[in-house]
Image: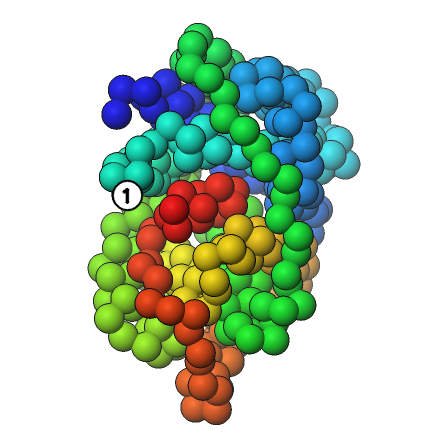
Amino acid sequence: MRPIGAILASVALLQLGSGLLNTLLAVTANEQGFSTARIGVIMSGFFVGFACGIFISGRLIRRMGHIRTFAFCAAVCASIALLHSLWVDPWAWMALRFLYGLSLVTLMTVTESWLNARAEKHERGRVFAMYMVVNLGGIALAQQLLRLSPGELLVLFSVSAILSCWALLPITISSRSQPHIPERAKSSLKKIIGFAPLAVATSALSGLAMGAFWAMAPLYASKLGFGLSEVGLLMSLTIVGGALLQIPIGRFSDTQDRRKVLVVVAALAAGVCLMMPLAWSNTSLMAVFFVWGGLSFSLYPLGVAQLLDQLHPDEVVSGSTDMLVLHGAGAALAPLLVGLIMNLVGPQGMPLYMAAILGLLATYAIYQVRHVSVLTAGEQAHFEPMAQSSHEIVEMIER
């Protein structure tokens, strides 16, 4: 496993910097007096950039090479983190978030394609598990960095920039050969909608729900009177819940009709959202978010597994890329909608919005179970816990 140590170290540092910046921005924008709707616009910029980056990252890597692309994009991320503290303007922040999302997905494509090339076939499962632990663990730990400077939020932008710079160190000293990035597979979305509409709906609607959490949950907690360290703890607990509960939910779905598991998980997640406005203390709300994270983080990988059940091996890369684009599009739209809703009805508009989205998914899944038969392309695929990332990770699972 030594050959991938440098890659995983860079991933950890990247996620520390990115995870810190995401939460920090929402809290800082609120303290700067930006309206909730405007904060939603700012936070959506990241997901728009992320979705756009899916289409251009491979081309950039083929032109510049892995190490030079990584260095370029990490420098962009570090510069953007610093510019947020120097240029406090909502429209500038929206543009910076777009560039950050575009750069981050390119960095993920670099690291994940390198992991794909480095991992031997017999150890791919272990490599994937280690990658997801580092990925989600880095984001969860990043939330606790908010405790470093509770009195001066702008200092933390420098911390995020430093972490992005440090991410350069392990990967740029690597002496290993760089893998080849193939041309992006041609989209098959129209075909997928025809034979796997539930997978498509799950990807898009889970994006609408998860985008609300990643972008607006720090603002939601701040509006409820949470201190900075409490905001970080709520985010960390949700991510940890998502990391821990994905595995038993996924393994159970491998032995059952995955659509029925999706119905139960989406319905429970919607119900948990309705409990959020009823929480009687900050601690109880954190516990509710922990459970919600475990349920909601499972939806996107359930949708991907449902799709893989129905795809032939040569369709996996294009299909997983389409799912990622749909998820990113939903995540980009979510902050805009939640920002407007919170502007109209207050902070509790966020959990009510998420309950409506997840309830819609559960309802559609029930319709699919009752009225639609599913044809699989072979053996049922195995569920793998995952976060929104590049299509390279799904390719690793299927190899």
Residue at x 24% of width, y 67% of height = 252
> Does residue 232 lie above or below 64 as drawn?
below
Residue 70: give x, y in percent of width and height. Answer: 56, 21
**Which amino acid, by three-letter code, is at mark 1?**
Gly
- Viewer-closest of 173 and 191: 191
Compared across the picture, whether 111 is left or right of 291 comes to right
How many numbered markers are drawn?
1
In the image, residue 88 above or below residue 249: above
Outermost residue, right side: 91
Could one spot residue 288 in this view of the protein?
A: no
Q: In which quarter of the image is residue 63?
A: top right
Question: Where is 245 relative to 183, above or below?
Answer: below
Comparing 13 with 182, the one in front is: 182
In the displayed structure image, the side of residue 53 where residue 134 appears, left or right: left
Q: Where is residue 287 in the image (x, y as percent from the top left)?
A: 28, 55
Residue visible at 46% across and 57% down? 313
| Residue 372, position as x, y percentages in the image | 48, 87
Residue position marked by numbered label 1 in the rendering: 125
Q: Residue at x 41, y 67 (%)?
A: 309
- Report which quarter residue 205 is drawn in: bottom right
Direction bottom: furthest residue: 371
Determine the secondary structure under disc 1: helix
